[in-house]
Image (cartoon, coloured by chain):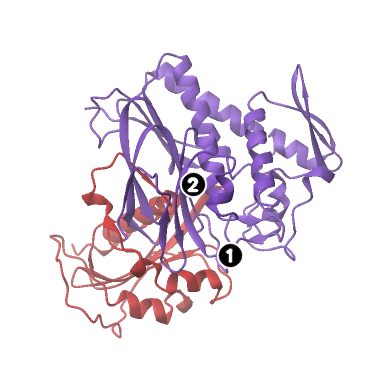
Chain colours: A red, B purple
Amino acid sequence: MSQMLTAPSRARAARRAAPVVASAAVIATLSGCAAAVDTTVEAEPELQPTTEPEIVVDPSYRDGSFRADGAYQSPAGDESIIVVMQLENDIVTDVEIGLYPTSATSSTYQDLFAGGIAEKVIGTDIDDLDVTVVAGSSLTSIGFRAAVETIKAEALDD
Amino acid sequence: MVGPSSFEAIGTPWRIGHGGAETPVGSLGAALAPDDLTAVLERIEQFDRDWSRFRDDSLVSRIAREAGSWRLPADARPMLALYEQLHALTDARLTPLVGASLERLGYDAAYRLTPSGAPLPAPSWADTIALRHTVEGITLDTVAPVVLDVGAAGKGYLVDLVGDLLAARGVGDSVVDASGDVRVRGERSIRVALENPADPTKAVGVVELHNAALCASAINRRAWGNGLHHIIDAVTGLPVDQGVIATWVVADTALVADGLATALFFAEPVRLAEAFSFEWVRLTSDGRLDASPGLRGELFA
C-alpha cells in the first residue's frame, strides 16, 4: 500500500496547492496498489507542503490522507481508479491517481508522468474557457471527479 | 434552457444536442425527442452487438472462435476501407487484427489487465483475412480464428453513424459528443477544449469546429500500469512508445479523425497527409505541442 505514494510525485505535488474542489489540480502519477482500497483516513504528519495555502474554501475538512475509488466505465466495462489526497488546512497538498491492478513500482509509463508532463504543458483552466466540449482523457477524469466527491464527503468536518 | 441528451453507452458517456446557429457556444443544444433518442440507443446497441470483442454474443466474438466466411454488416465497408489505408500508411503497425495482442497484454473481455505471456505481434492481414465485396455486401474470409479490434476508429465511426441516423430523421443540426470524439453538423460552430492528458482540469488548446469532427487519443486513457496502454504497435505486440503522448485530429468525419488520431502515434503527419485531408495537434513526452498550420484554433503552450 505504501507504494501508492512515490517519492518523486509527492515532492512535486507538495509544491502545489489547490482548493478542495473537484477541479483540484491532478498529477496523474500511475503507481501501484495491489489490493482493493477502502476509504480510510490516516494521518500523515510527516508531509510538509512547501508552499503556503493559496485558497481556503468555505467548508472545513479534516487534515489527513484520504483514499477513494472513482468508478467509471470503459469499453471493457466498469473500471476504477484510486485517488489519494492529502488534505491540510482545507488545501489539497498532494494528489495521486493509481490504477487497478498494479504491477511494478517503476515503469517507463510511470516515469513519463512523474517526469513532469503536467509542469511542461500547463495550459489554461478549462473552467475559464468558453467551450462546448472537452476532448481528451475524459474517462479517467469522470472517475477522478467521482473519487473527489467521495473524499469530500468523507473528510467533511461535521 | 434544457441541456442535451446524455447517457452512457459502449462504456462511454455520450452527450447529444441539436440546435442551429443561435445556440450559445457553451451549450451542446437541446435534448433529442424521445423517439430520436430511442433510435440512437438502438443504433449504438446494434454496433456494439456487431463489433464489441468484450461481449460473447457479438459477431467479432464469433469470428474469434472459429474460422469461416462471415457476412459483415452494411456499416463495415467504410470502416474496413479506412483500416486498409491506415494499415498501409503505418507499415502494418495499425491493424484491426491487433485484438489478440491486446488480450495477451491483459486488455481482454475478463479485464485481467495482467499480461498472460510474451508480447504477441498481430497476424499479417494478407495471410489471415480477405474481404470480398459482393452485391449482397461484404464478406470476411478467415483462415483461422482472429480477434478483431476496431478500437482505433470504431467509436468515431459510431459518432458518424449516430449523426447520420439523426439527419435521416430530420435532425440536421446536431452535436454528437462521445467523450472525446465529437462531430458537429449544420449551421453552428462549436469550440472544443483540448484536455491536457496529465491534468484534466487544463486545456492545452481550443479548436473551432464547423461541419467537421474532432477526435482525441491519449495514452493515459485506459492505461493499466507498467508501461501498458491501449495503443498497441501490431508489429511488436507492445504498447507504442515513440514519444507521442496525445493527439487530436480534425477531419470531415469522425471515422477518419478517430483513425488518424491513432495513426499519429505510428506515423508522421506528412505521410498521412498523402492520403487524407486533416488538421492535427500532437503532444510529445518532452512537453512539445505541435500542430498543423491550418488548424483553426489556438494552443496555450
> What's under tag 1, amino acid-wise?
Asp
In the displayed structure image, the side of residue A137 where residue A87 appears, left or right: left
Q: Residue B94 placed where, x, y %?
A: 65, 49
Please name the residue that numbered disc 1 is placed on: B241
Q: Residue B225 placed where, x, y %?
A: 55, 66
Which tag is nearer the camera, tag 2 or tag 1?
A: 1
| Residue B231 visible at all | yes
In percent of the image, x 59 and y 49: which residue is there?
A: B271
Gap between marks 2 and 1 measured at Cα:
25 Å
Q: Image quarter for residue A15?
A: bottom left
Q: Residues within 10 Å of mark 1 (few under 14, many from 20)?
A: some
Please name the residue that numbered disc 2 is placed on: A73
Between B183 and B296, the one nearer to me in the picture = B296
In the displayed structure image, the side of residue B291 where residue B222 appears, left or right: right
In the displayed structure image, the side of residue B199 where residue B271 appears, left or right: right
| Residue A32 visible at all | no
